[in-house]
Image (spheres, rainbow, N blue to C red):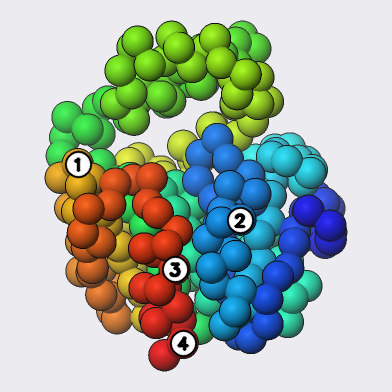
């Protein structure tokens, strides 16, 4: 990241701008920084001014406590203000949930797209998320960042053997570095349920995407988002999973954002 702006509470936010055209801000999900979405940005830069930023507590951005979801909405407002004052937003996973809350908050947006915001679609999933919140809070409170990362990976359905292998990999240290921000993603998702009151307050068109190879609950959550906003469209990307391929996603986003 090579630029910096300041959020309402004084937190420094690192961001990068590429391309030329209408502004599109990309919002990453859990355990990631703005750089995670760089391949997608590269595929949109021929038609849009694409902005990548590190959410607070990640990468080169700062983090002034106490945390609140409203602070992250203010962060997005600061980034948008720094790059022209109006934008379209794309968010993946929990970043999508943040984007929806920002849209409901009245930010100067043209359009919003989200990919598989992981809302809980039944009571069992809600209970699992409640337990995850308790366990995550305890792990981070004890400074056990590795355990916090493992809790998140288990929540996503990653097999125990894969988690054990990940703990031994070079990438693990980087995951532990951003582990405290897992609490922020958890807060953005609220009680885990689809936030009907948030969706009803959104006044811009929303494209809610899911992968055809993703688990059914993720597709159901994406459909529920499209159904819950006044101007929502649901679309499935054939053969894609939660790790959506930029080459598949970029043309769909470009078509939607160009309208």
| Figure check: 101 above or below 251 | above
Tag 2's secondary structure? helix
Rounded to the nearest whole Å, what is the CA distance between mark 2 and mark 1?
25 Å
Of badges 3 and 1, the one in the foreground is: 3
Task: Give the mark, 3 or 1, whose residue is nearer the N terminus.
Answer: 1
Question: How far across and down, in percent of the image, does residue 177 sit?
Answer: 68, 25
Q: Residue furthest bottom?
A: 259
Crowd rating for badge 1 (residues with CA inside 10 Å; few <14, some 14–19, many 20+): few
Q: Which mark is residue 215?
A: 1
Q: Which mark is residue 258?
A: 4
Q: Are marks 3 and 1 in contact (CB under 8 Å)?
A: no
Task: Give the mark, 2 or 4, whose residue is nearer the N terminus.
Answer: 2
Label 2, on which residue? 38
Task: Give the mark, 2 or 3, whose residue is nearer the N terminus.
Answer: 2
Question: How far across and down, in percent of the image, does residue 146 sit?
Answer: 56, 14
Quadrant of the rendered image containing residue 85: bottom right
At 60% across and 24% down in the image, what residue appears?
171
| Figure check: 234 above or below 176 | below
Q: Are marks 4 and 3 in contact (CB under 8 Å)?
A: no
Tag 4's secondary structure? helix
Of badges 4 and 3, the one in the foreground is: 3
Q: Are marks 2 and 1 in contact (CB under 8 Å)?
A: no
Label 3, on which residue? 250
Of badges 2 and 4, the one in the foreground is: 2
> Is residue 242 among the parts visible in the rendering?
yes
Crowd rating for badge 4 (residues with CA inside 10 Å; few <14, some 14–19, many 20+): few
Task: Give the mark, 4 or 3, whose residue is nearer the N terminus.
Answer: 3
Tag 3's secondary structure? helix
| Figure check: 151 above or below 61 | above
């Amino acid at each position: 990241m090579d630029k910096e702006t300041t959020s309402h509470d004084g937190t420094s936010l690192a961001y990068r701008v590429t391309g030329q055209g209408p502004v599109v801000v990309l919002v990453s999900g859990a355990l990631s920084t703005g750089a995670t979405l760089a391949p997608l940005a590269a595929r949109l830069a021929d038609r849009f001014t694409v902005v990548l930023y590190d959410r607070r507590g990640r990468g080169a951005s700062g983090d002034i406590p106490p945390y609140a979801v409203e602070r992250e909405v203010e962060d997005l407002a600061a980034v948008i203000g720094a790059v022209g004052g109006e934008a379209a937003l794309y968010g993946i996973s929990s970043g999508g949930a943040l984007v929806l809350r920002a849209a409901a908050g009245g930010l100067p947006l043209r359009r919003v797209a989200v990919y598989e915001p992981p809302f809980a679609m039944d009571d069992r999933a809600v209970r699992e998320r409640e337990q995850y919140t308790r366990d995550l809070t305890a792990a981070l409170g004890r400074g056990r960042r590795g355990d916090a990362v493992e809790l998140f990976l288990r929540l996503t359905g990653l097999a125990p053997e894969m988690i054990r292998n990940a703990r031994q990999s070079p990438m693990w240290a980087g995951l532990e570095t951003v582990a405290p921000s897992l609490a922020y993603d958890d807060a953005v998702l609220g009680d885990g349920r689809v936030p009907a009151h948030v969706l009803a307050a959104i006044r811009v068109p929303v494209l809610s995407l899911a992968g055809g190879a993703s688990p059914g609950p993720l597709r159901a959550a994406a459909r529920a988002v499209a159904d819950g906003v006044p101007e929502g469209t649901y679309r499935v990307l054939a053969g894609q999973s939660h790790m959506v391929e930029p080459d598949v996603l970029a043309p769909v986003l470009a078509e939607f954002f160009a309208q």
